[in-house]
Image (cartoon, rainbow, N blue to C red):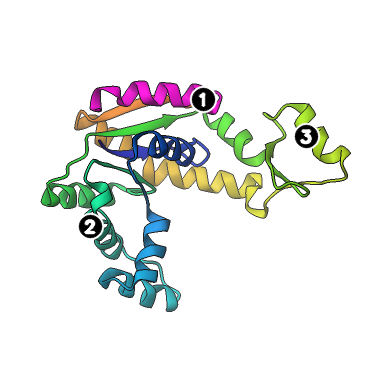
Amino acid sequence: MRIVLLGAPGSGKGTQAKNLMADRNIPQVSTGDMLREAVAAGTRFGLQAKATIDAGELVSDDIVLGIISERLTQPDTADGFILDGFPRTLQQAHDLEELLDSLGTPLDAAILMNVDFDILMKRLTGRRTCSLTGKLLNVYFSPQEELDECTNAGGELIQREDDNEETISNRLDVYRKQTEPLIDFYRDRGSLKIVDADGTIDEVYERFTDAIAPLS
């Protein structure tokens, strides 16, 4: 099973990828993780990425594709992979398609984790961490007793600096402009599957696994 996960920030891509990875023993291939691993391992593209990062520049699509190609030739991807965080643009989608075809590992599907943007805003701006336990909570969705448990014990509900409304609005705007066009890209290829990602983690995971069941 070879899939790409699509969806806006806060749609639950990473969470569901980890669930699927645990259930099916299929690796989650995350761009950030791959970059760090390639740099640490000193691979050909990892060394190029390190030089670029050290120079304070953004890693180019060519280097990222090279790192993906290195990662997808490792034994643990023989039964499939979950691509998370790439592609983000139409050009990246075209380049990835060419790369996977050349490796003989074309995608089986692109899974869109579909959530209303108003809900995404609440998911992201409402995130808090209990200063005592490190537990992740949400002021909009967590049960009040869980929020009170932290504050009644003398803890604080801490919000990350980048979880403010302005920053998140900008991230969602970038998603709309750069990544949302991928929905039609994969729909035109007949490989798009849409999952309603509103609900509990377990509810969404059940829909997710139903969507990919024909690929197994």
Identify the mark at residue 138; answer none if there is no mark.
none
Classify 70 as above or below 17: below
Q: Is residue 172 shown in magenta?
A: no
Residue 164 at x, y percent in the picture: 66, 47
Q: Amino acid at mark 3?
A: Leu
Q: Is residue 174 left or right of residue 118?
A: left
Q: Which residue is mark 1?
A: 202
Q: Which residue is mark 2?
A: 69
Q: In terms of sequence position, does the residue under pointer 3 or pointer 1 come before the other?
A: 3
Residue drawn at the location 17% of the way across and 42% of the way down: 106
Q: Amino acid at mark 1?
A: Asp
Name which quarter of the figure residue 147 lies in: top right
Secondary structure found at label 2 = helix
Residue 175 at x, y percent in the picture: 44, 44
Quadrant (top left/top right/bottom left/bottom right) for the C terminus: top left
Q: In terms of sequence position, does the residue under pointer 1 or pointer 2 come before the other?
A: 2
Question: Mark 1 Cα within 10 Å, few/some/many (few <14, many 20+)?
Answer: few
Q: Nearer the viewer, mark 1 or mark 2?
A: 1
Q: In terms of sequence position, does the residue under pointer 3 or pointer 2 come before the other?
A: 2
Residue 128 at x, y percent in the picture: 70, 43
The magenta region covers 199-216
Q: Which residue is mark 3?
A: 147
Q: Amino acid at mark 2?
A: Ser
Label 3 to label 2: alpha-carbon separation:
44 Å
Q: Is residue 215 shown in magenta?
A: yes
Residue drawn at the location 27% of the way across and 57% of the way down: 71
Question: Mark 3 Cα within 10 Å, few/some/many (few <14, many 20+)?
Answer: some
Question: Mark 2 Cα within 10 Å, few/some/many (few <14, many 20+)?
Answer: some
Label 3 to label 1: alpha-carbon separation:
21 Å
